């Protein structure tokens, strides 16, 4: 029993209502990090990491640092450092149970976002961690991602954010 009315339960029902994707949205999907995506990641100071645990519970964790903090190793692999923080490790522990991962990279002032989906692992490889040191602190671990899908979201899917003032928040 669901607390909602008129619930759709099959893809066929949803497609009958919404339709099928336009061809160009399918054609932009790639299975690798090309030069354009690499440049986008190099200037991105922020990303969202989506994971799911063995029991199906989901987590979306923000990660931010100086632009380029995520290292692209080659067209199929990238590495995200785990900086010292609150030590919750929700996404990290999810990866141990379920390696599927989704990333959305953002760049301030840009209307598009980059989505990367793939399989993740947790690594302590010094060859990967040492170059990601910041102010003399080397991460203890990192998330390694093997890219399976990558594409830019068009500007319609993620409208540019404007600065929010105290009056905007008060009415929320």
Image: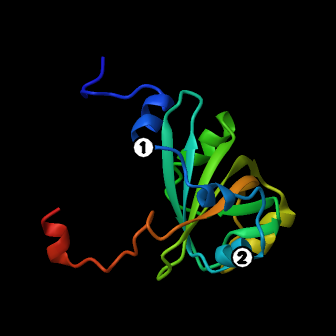
**Percent position of residue 151, x then y:** 65, 62
Q: From what the image shows, is residue 19 above or below residue 103?
A: above
Q: Is residue 172 left or right of residue 113?
A: left
Q: Residue at x 60, y 51 (%)?
A: 102
- Name the one closer to the observer, 72 or 155: 155
Q: Residue at x 77, y 55 (%)?
A: 31
Q: Which quadrant, please, contains the C terminus?
A: bottom left
Q: From what the image shows, is residue 41 above or below residue 78?
A: below
Q: From what the image shows, is residue 29 above or below residue 59?
A: below
Image color mode: rainbow
Tell me the residue that label 1 is attached to.
18
Q: Which quadrant, please, contains the N terminus?
A: top left
Point out which mark residue 48 bears.
none
Q: Residue furthest top?
A: 1
Of tags 2 and 1, the one toward the viewer is 1
Q: Residue at x 66, y 73 (%)?
A: 41
**Percent position of residue 118, x then y:** 71, 49
What is the number of callouts on the image? 2
Q: Is residue 43 left or right of residue 8?
A: right
Point out which mark residue 36 bears.
2
- The answer to whether marks 2 and 1 mark residues whose Cβ atoms lie closer than 8 Å is no
- Name the one closer to the observer, 3 or 97: 3
Q: Residues within 10 Å of mark 2 (few under 14, many from 20)?
A: few
- Name the one closer to the observer, 20 or 79: 20
Where disc 2 sits, the SS reads helix
> How far, Cα to Cα, is label 2 from label 1?
31 Å
Q: Residues within 10 Å of mark 1 (few under 14, many from 20)?
A: few
Q: Residue at x 33, y 79 (%)?
A: 162
**Percent position of residue 115, x then y:** 60, 60
Where disc 1 sits, the SS reads helix
Name the N-terminal-most of marks 2 and 1: 1
């Amino acid at each position: 029993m669901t607390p909602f009315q008129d619930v759709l339960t099959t893809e066929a029902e949803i497609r009958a209502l919404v339709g099928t994707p336009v061809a160009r949205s399918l054609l932009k999907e790639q299975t690798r990090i090309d030069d354009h995506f690499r440049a986008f990641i190099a200037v991105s100071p922020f990303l969202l990491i989506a994971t799911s645990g063995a029991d199906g519970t989901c987590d979306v964790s923000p990660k931010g640092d100086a632009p380029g903090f995520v290292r692209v190793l080659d067209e199929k692999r990238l590495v995200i450092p785990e900086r010292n923080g609150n030590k919750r490790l929700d996404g990290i522990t999810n990866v141990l149970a379920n390696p599927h991962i989704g990333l959305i990279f953002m760049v301030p002032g840009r209307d598009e976002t980059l989505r990367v989906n793939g399989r993740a692992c947790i690594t302590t490889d010094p060859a990967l961690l040492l170059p990601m040191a910041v102010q003399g602190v080397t991460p203890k671990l990192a998330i390694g991602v093997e890219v399976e899908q990558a594409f830019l979201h068009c500007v319609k899917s993620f409208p540019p954010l404007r600065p929010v003032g105290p009056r905007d928040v008060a009415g929320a």
